[in-house]
Amino acid sequence: MNNKTYTVKKGDTLYGISKQFNTSAQKIRELNNLKNDNIVPSQVLIISENNGTNPNECVIYTVKKGDSLYEIAKKYNTSVDAIKRYNNLTTNNLSIGQKIRIPCNIEDNDDTVMPKYISYTVKAGDNLYNIAKKYNTTVDKIKRDNNLQSNNLTIGKILLIEDTSDQSTIEECFGEEYEAPSSNITYTVQKGDNLYSIANKYNTTVNEIKSLNNLTSNNLSIGQQLRIPTNASGNITYTVQKGDNLYSIARKYNTTVNEIKRKNNLTSNNLSIGQQLII
């Protein structure tokens, strides 16, 4: 039995190694009987076992509260499309308690695009909100990818951030036929915001926002991420900020680059600071 192994190098972490080999830190811990995530340079880790199992063998997974096809696919090192094909699903919607079959391995010709990550070292004055904004991601995603239980950061801490810099390739994939993943947008609470002003801005209601975010009160905190329904009538007007590009704006509002260009009669991807866009 030939197992795939990896020799630990200086600066390695279990999470980083798991990303490199498209597996999980938990799986590596189990294969190597590790009690925690501590590893040392020159340590040899088993990454995967060649145990002769059928590559088409699958597991049955029961959907839990908060699950999504993306998170389940990531957990089992497969793809959303593979799970949907395996279960004859036509949408990404899941229901709690639903049983879905998970393909344990993907054929080599399955065009799965695994996210790439970069390392970011926390500096004085940093917080999760400004880091998320800098890298066009969300506070929740950074916390999830780095197993953070709170928003507290320490100077020198290394964070793994999903790299979205290869925008030209993504824009080609997310063309006119790309459908936005949901009818909601994510809004980050700013100083002075309240539920009423946010609802008014996005042509929705306070109750809709509270229901969508499972809020039991009207209290908000700066940096909090809210899902906002976009099924109300009317367009959103967005003012281009420094560092913006069409892809980042399209991603923020769950739309496409081509759709923004169409609504604004744009012939190129060039933007200028202060430019008004209809979303």
Image (cartoon, rainbow, N blue to C red):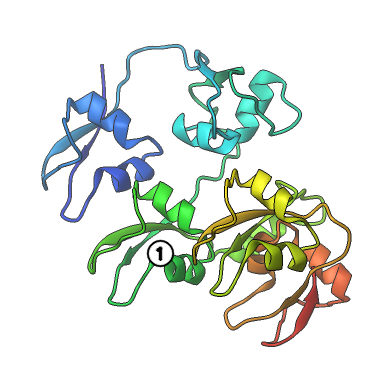
61 relative to 81, above or below: above
113 relative to 200, above or below: above
Residue 161, by quadrant, is bottom left
- Dot 1: what SS? helix
229 relative to 252, above or below: above
Location of the C terminus by quadrant is: bottom right
Looking at the picture, tell me which residue is in the foreground, 45 or 234.
234
Q: Residues within 10 Å of mark 1 (few under 14, many from 20)?
A: some
Say left or right for 138 vs 235: left
Q: Give how far across and how far down residue 109 sits, in percent.
A: 59, 33
Q: Give how far across and how far down residue 93 sits, in percent.
A: 69, 32
119 relative to 39, above or below: below
- Residue hosting label 1: 128
- Residue drawn at 22 percent across, 67 percent down: 156
Residue 206, by quadrant, is bottom right
Q: Residue furthest front?
A: 217
Say left or right for 117 vs 176: left
Location of the N terminus by quadrant is: top left
- Residue drawn at 15 percent across, 54 percent down: 10
